[in-house]
Image (tube, rainbow, N blue to C red):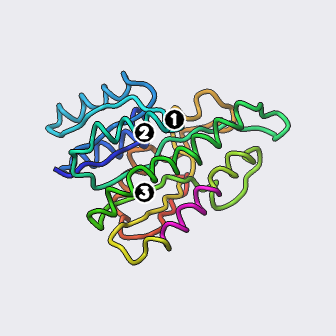
Amino acid sequence: MKSVIITGAGSGLGKELALLFAKQGFHTILTGRTLDKLQSVEKEIHEAGGSAQSFSLDITILQEISSLMTQIQSHDLYGLINNAGVGHFGPLDHLGEQEIQDMLQTNVLGTIYMTQAVLPFFKEKNGGLLMNIISTAGLKGKVNESVYAASKFAVRGFTESLQKELENTNIKVKAVYMGGMDTPFWDESDHITNKSRLRSPEEVAVMILDNLDKESIVIESKK
């Protein structure tokens, strides 16, 4: 059975993508910082007849990534979905040092580290799916999103460069640019006051899988 690693799989879009890939017959490797959330998703997948495993993982720590890859080295690894992300919003002079570091380390370095870890597996069999969930903040700057947008522009450049680097292989690199979704991502922020106008993560997940033939998938936030 082919396996797919999904980061940030405990809720929101990561969870919904995990459910969809499991329904398509993939073994889903669920990763994130909160194990009980991952195990809840794992249980839901198992109850629906699918296959899944949960692994606590901080994608900013190379040793934890290395440990994960050792644990799954016998899997037939088909894909990596870099979905985990952190966002802090507001005027630049109101952002704290830790908030800035969180966004750059998780959104940029975490994506790079995870990709670097799986590439040898993909190159060995000359195939695989690499999907980076970037956000429309990687396409256009937005008010009160300066550092968040900077992190997403960085992931966009990383993704587009990999598309060129791997264009003569059977490794497919996909960039997903979606607007805000109605998820817990906004619960501790007043950056978006009315989440109900946003697409649901279930809707976005379906749209992503329906457009997997495209290198870049752009999904606006409004319904």
Q: Residue 63: give x, y in percent of width and height.
A: 46, 35
Q: Residue 159: within the magenta?
A: yes
Question: Label 2, on which residue?
Answer: 65
Q: Residue 80: give x, y in percent of width and height.
A: 37, 51
Three-letter amino acid code at disc 2? Ile
Identify the magenta region. 153-163
Q: Left or right: where does residue 17 sit relative to residue 151? A: left
Report the residue that reaches farthest toward the bottom: 168
CB within 8 Å, label 1 to label 2: yes
N-term mark: 3 or 1: 1
Real-space Cα separation, disc 1 to disc 2, in angstroms: 7 Å
Question: Label 1, on which residue?
Answer: 61
Three-letter amino acid code at disc 1? Ile
37 versus 27 height, above or below: above
Q: Quadrant of residue 8?
A: top left
Q: Residue 31: give x, y in percent of width and height.
A: 38, 36
Total marks drawn? Answer: 3
Please identify, in this view, whether the residue under mark 2 or under mark 3 is nearer the observer: 2
